[in-house]
Image: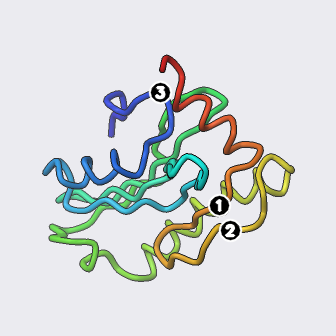
Amino acid sequence: MALDSFPARPLAHDEVAVLAASGRFVDVRPVNAFHFPERDTRLVTALVLVTETGLRAVEYDPTVREWSVVRSESLDGPESMADVPDALLGDVQAELERRVSELEDAGVVSETPADDDEDVEVREATGLGTVLYEQYTDGE
C-alpha cells in the first residue's frame, strides 16, 4: 500500500478523523499519539488502516520523515473494525506500541502515558514528541 499521499510529518488527531471519514478505508484506528496539553494538540504516529481486503499497520518515522507499512494482513471483506479478529488487532497494536517503546527505552521519549485511553496509547510529549511537534509545525 502506497503511503505517498500521507504528509512527511505526524498527523494531527483531526486529520486522522478526516482520513477515517474519507471513504478510502473501512475503518481507521490511531494507536500511538503524543499529547501536547499546552497546545491542545495530539499528534498521531501509528495507525491501523482497514480496507475491504485487509489490514495495514502504518507508522511515522521521524528520522526519515515518512510513513511506512509495518505489517499487512489479508482479510475477507471486513465492514468495520469489529470484523477484525481481536487477536490480530491486539497483536498489531502491540507491535506498533512496542516500536515506540523501543524509543522510550533508548531514552528518546517519556515512559509515562498521558492517560489511559484503551484504544490509543497517548504519551506526554517529551524528547521524540518535541521533534514530532517541530516536524508537524514546519513551514508555519
How far separated are the C-alphas under marks 2 and 3? 25 Å
How far separated are the C-alphas under marks 2 and 1? 4 Å
Which badge, 2 or 3, comes first in the chain's sequence?
Answer: 3
Provide residue 35's location: percent of width, then percent of height. Answer: 58, 55
Q: Say what secondary structure mark 1 lies in.
A: strand
Label 1: which residue?
Answer: 123
Label 3: which residue?
Answer: 8
Which badge, 1 or 3, comes first in the chain's sequence?
Answer: 3
Q: Is residue 88 above or below residue 22?
A: below
Contact check, label 1 and label 3, Cβ < 8 Å: no
Label 2 sits on what residue type? Pro
Provide residue 2's location: percent of width, then percent of height. Answer: 33, 34
How far separated are the C-alphas under marks 1 and 3? 21 Å
Label 2: which residue?
Answer: 113
* Residue ID at (68%, 51%): 125
* Residue ID at (18%, 53%): 21
Q: Mark 2 against mark 3, which lies toward the viewer?
A: 2
Provide residue 78's location: percent of width, then percent of height. Answer: 19, 70
Label 3 sits on what residue type? Ala
Q: Nearer the viewer, residue 130 or 73?
A: 130
Contact check, label 2 and label 1, Cβ < 8 Å: yes
Label 1 sits on what residue type? Arg
Q: Mark 1 against mark 3, which lies toward the viewer?
A: 1
Q: Is residue 27 above or below residue 126?
A: below
